[in-house]
Image (cartoon, helix red, strand yellow):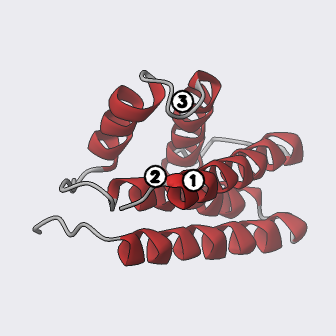
Amino acid sequence: MSPKISKELAIHRLEQAKEDLTAGKLLYNSNLYKSANNRAYYSIFHSIKAVLALEPIDFKRHKDVLAYFNKNYINTEIFPKMMGRKIINSSNIREDSDYDDEFVVDANKTKEQLSTAEELIQLVEEYLSSNKN
């Protein structure tokens, strides 16, 4: 897939992130925490992809997206370092929720994941607003 650079793509991806967050909250309110964790993670992932839409780069694997974002946006403090740790934690919880049959997650941990997604959406909105591409 060739990378497409555009503000419109960034906005589209951010809207997807918001939709994922809404779905995550609905699942959370239905006590479906594993599924809510999945949607929270995808909200985070699509938020990151919104930022990357402004660059001539794309990745096929999630771990490559996360590594690139950490290296170029977290380590350079374009986004807060604490957010990098929260993103990695969310990725780990999503993998456990999706693939570990014995993984049990509670409401508080899921609420934390949803809060991280909400926080990142806000940061990405600010970033996109300030970016003149």
Q: Residue at x 59, y 49 (%)?
A: 97
* Label pair 3/2, CB-CB below 8 angstroms: no
* Label 3 sits on residue: 84
Q: Residue 15: where, in percent of width, then height?
A: 57, 76
Kindly give the residue lying farthest to the front in the view shown: 132
Q: Residue 31: where, in percent of width, then height?
A: 86, 64
- Kind of residue at badge 3: Gly
Give the SS element for disc 2: helix
Q: Callout 1 environment at 10 Å: few (<14), some (14 to 19), or many (20+)?
A: many
Q: Is residue 36 left or right of residue 131?
A: right
Q: Nearer the viewer, mark 3 or mark 1?
A: 1
Kindly give the residue lying farthest to the left in the view shown: 2
* Label 2 sits on residue: 48
Q: Residue at x 53, y 68 (%)?
A: 14
Labels 3 and 2: the sequence-earlier one: 2
Labels 2 and 1: the sequence-earlier one: 2
Give 115 or 109, whichever is nearer the viewer.
115
User: Which quadrant is the N terminus positioned in?
Assistant: bottom left
Labels 3 and 1: the sequence-earlier one: 3
Q: Residue at x 34, y 49 (%)?
A: 62
Q: Residue 23: where, in percent of width, then height?
A: 70, 74
Q: Residue 60: where, in percent of width, then height?
A: 21, 56
- Kind of residue at badge 1: Val
* Label pair 2/1, CB-CB below 8 angstroms: yes
Give the vertical position of 129 relative to 101 (above or below): below
Cα distance, mark 3 to mark 1?
Answer: 13 Å
* Label 1 sits on residue: 124
